[in-house]
Image (cartoon, rainbow, N blue to C red):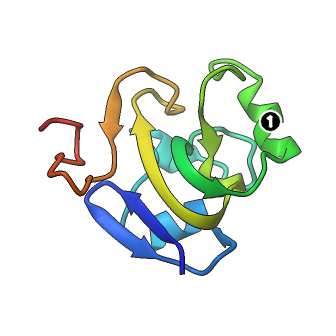
């Protein structure tokens, strides 16, 4: 079973599980501020669940690519929409600041095996 590392949690999920749904079911809020209230609930139109992902996931689909090609997102930034991403192997997820998660400051990242804090990237 693939493992997702996000915030200070290690979550096991089925291969092919939806990343957004799995994170939310395990108490990991991937929406910044008021985007929690107005997000599109997983249809890929709002872009508020954008995260950086390291590991094996599904290829980018047209919804993800289209939404991230529009401001404030940028197709050149290494982000994915969690709602449009399927987990295929072990992954590490990092969330950035900004209403759409498009900022440059880390909000949370996974706790590493080396003792890194996972909440805000401090050691």
Dot 1: what SS? helix
Q: Is 88 on the left-hand or right-hand side of 96? A: right
The quadrant holding residue 121 is top left
Looking at this rendering, what residue extends furthest in the front direction?
114
Residue 40 percent location from the top left of the image: 67, 50
Mark 1 is surrounded, within 10 Å at the Cα level, by few (under 14), some (14 to 19) or many (20 or more) other residues, namely some
Looking at this rendering, what residue extends furthest in the right direction?
62
Residue on which the image places disc 1:
65
Q: In the picture shown, does residue 64 fall above or below 68? A: below
Q: Residue at x 49, y 33 (%)?
A: 101
Q: Is 97 on the left-hand or right-hand side of 14? A: left
On the rendered image, what quadrant is the C terminus found in? top left
The quadrant holding residue 56 is bottom right
Q: Residue at x 47, y 48 (%)?
A: 36
Kindly tell me whether residue 78 is visible in this rendering: yes
Viewer-side residue, 43 vs 1: 1
Kindly tell me whether residue 26 is visible in this rendering: no
Q: Residue at x 45, y 64 (%)?
A: 4
Q: In the picture shown, does residue 98 fall above or below 3? A: above
Q: Is 36 on the left-hand or right-hand side of 15? A: left
Q: Residue at x 19, y 51 (%)?
A: 114
In this figure, what is the number of numbered marks?
1
Viewer-side residue, 76 vs 66: 76
Q: In the picture shown, does residue 37 fall above or below 19? A: above
Residue 54 percent location from the top left of the image: 52, 47
On the rendered image, what quadrant is the N terminus found in? bottom right
Q: In the picture shown, does residue 66 fall above or below 18? A: above
Residue 23 percent location from the top left of the image: 47, 64
Viewer-side residue, 59 vs 103: 59
């Amino acid at each position: 079973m693939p493992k997702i590392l996000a915030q200070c949690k290690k979550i096991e999920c089925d291969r092919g599980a939806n990343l957004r749904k799995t994170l939310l079911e395990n108490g990991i809020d991937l929406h910044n501020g008021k985007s929690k209230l107005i997000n599109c609930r997983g249809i890929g139109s709002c872009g508020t669940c954008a995260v950086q992902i390291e590991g094996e996931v599904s290829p980018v689909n047209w919804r993800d690519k289209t939404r991230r090609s529009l401001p404030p997102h940028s197709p050149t930034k290494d982000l994915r929409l969690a709602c449009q991403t399927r987990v295929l192997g072990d992954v590490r997820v990092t969330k950035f600041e900004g209403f759409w998660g498009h900022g440059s400051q880390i909000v949370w990242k996974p706790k590493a095996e080396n003792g890194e804090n996972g909440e805000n990237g401090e050691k």
